[in-house]
Image (tube, helix red, strand yellow):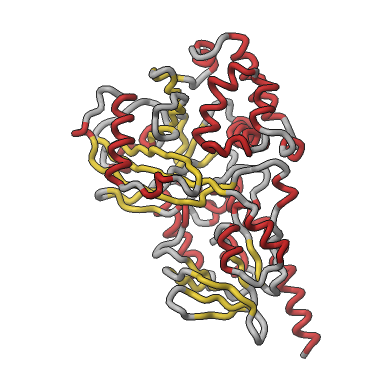
Amino acid sequence: MTLALRLAQQGQKVTLYESAPELGGLASAWQLDDIIWDRHYHVTLLSNSHLRSLLRELGLEKDIQWVETKTGFFTGAKMVSMSNSMEFLKFPPIGLIDKVRLGATIVHASRIEDWQALEQISVVDWLRKWSGKNTTEKIWLPLLRAKLGANYTKASAAFIWAIIARMYAARRSGMKKEMFGYVPGGYGRILSRMQDVLQKAGVTIRLGRRSTAIRSATQGGVTVKFADNSEVTHDQIVFTGPATTAADLCPELNAEEQRLLRGIEYQGIVCASLLLKKPLSPYYVTNITDTWVPFTAVIEMTALVNPKEFGGRTLVYLPKYVAIDDPLFEATDAEIQASFFTALKKMHPTLTDDDLLTFKVSRVRKVFVIPTLNYSKNLPPISMSVKGLHVLNSAHIVNGTLNVNETVQLAERAIPELLAQLSRQERVQHARV
């Protein structure tokens, strides 16, 4: 959407095709009982300059509500707060020396600028070097497994660096405490406003248009075929879906492009949204180190968002990050509810079946890329060998984590290259005339 807006603002005639019935992708909203809120959990940081700039352009930045949040850990079957320095010192799973090393690891990572060097080191080896074996085993590995599953062994140290750098950036912005923000109305409101702005800029929007093939056109340009067998041809196409999907849709790509695109490894998510009658805890995020819990973390959105947004109820997300072929994708909502809610009740013994109002599951197989060793050196190009075809997606985020701010930044950075390609094509066409 940011690409479409920027290209239209540069005088280009743009059509945006979306396979889903609504805009937004992973940032889209859906309905839970009588409320509409984000399908997955999102938060805005003070340091999210690209997202905040876009929200300012949409007239929404002034509405952001900033909240100081708290962080919890569920470890050893107990809930522990770790929201300030004193609580960190009291944190029970590790001793004082290990805490010093853990803190030093975080500070050291926040100061690293040469992230490419970290791509050559496995995340486990790097953490053991800086945090020690005990802290790595008790703290880091459970968190890595929760986010990456068995794929954590493939990840480079750049993965943990990107997470730490993002969280520390908020402190560098001038605040000495962790402040998270949200726009009242959530991403449903943001996307509605974005759609209005796109249409006013002259962008044509086509929803429910799933592409099945992309090929070069005989008379020049690029042709897209859709699921209903209809076709359209444009001078330039920018495909923003997953890299492996691009490889499937574009058979004319050369062998090297296919290799690079198919070499991108994705992690999926099964994320449950719950509406509850009452709050669970004061924590926005509860990290989980106990391996018997079937989900990654507890995200209590109402610890950030005013409960009035949800009619006084509590909105909780229970994400589980899994491999793209994990059997959990085939589980029914009822099976996931039985597993997840049973575990949540064990974590919070006062929670009862009667407290659950709504349970809804989102499944996405290709969510974020696993930053493997030497990842940036094996990155697919944006402009492909098929004339007029470009592939740009979250795989091109090489020194950050997948979030809306990074996605907007990626689009902004790509605009000069795309405009240069358009300029070259226009010069060639003019010369032919």
Placement of the C terminus among the 4 image quadrants: bottom right
Q: What residue is drawn where x is 68% and y is 21%?
A: 130
Which residue is at the far top?
A: 96
Q: Residue 218 or 69: which is nearer the viewer?
A: 218
The image quarter in which residue 12 lies: bottom right
Residue 397: percent from left, percent from top: 64, 49
Q: Eyeballing the image, is 223 above or below 402?
A: below
The image quarter in which residue 121 lies: top right
Residue 152: percent from left, percent from top: 58, 36
Q: What residue is drawn where x is 23% and y is 40%?
A: 357
Q: Residue 210 or 250: which is nearer the viewer?
A: 250
The image quarter in which residue 281 lies: top left
Q: What residue is drawn where x is 72% and y is 51%?
A: 378
* Relative horizontal placement of residue 55, taking residue 418 as reference (left or right): left
Q: What residue is drawn where x is 60% and y is 44%?
A: 370
Residue 120: percent from left, percent from top: 74, 37
Q: Is residue 206 in sight in this rendering?
A: yes
Q: Eyeballing the image, is 383 above or below 432?
A: above
* Relative horizontal placement of residue 409, taking residue 185 as reference (left or right): right
Which residue is at the far right?
A: 431
Q: How many marks?
A: 0
Residue 300: percent from left, percent from top: 38, 34
Q: Is residue 52 in sight in this rendering?
A: no
Which residue is at the far bottom?
A: 433
* Relative horizontal placement of residue 178, taking residue 160 as reference (left or right): left
Q: Residue 430 or 150: which is nearer the viewer?
A: 150
Q: Eyeballing the image, is 331 above or below 139?
A: below
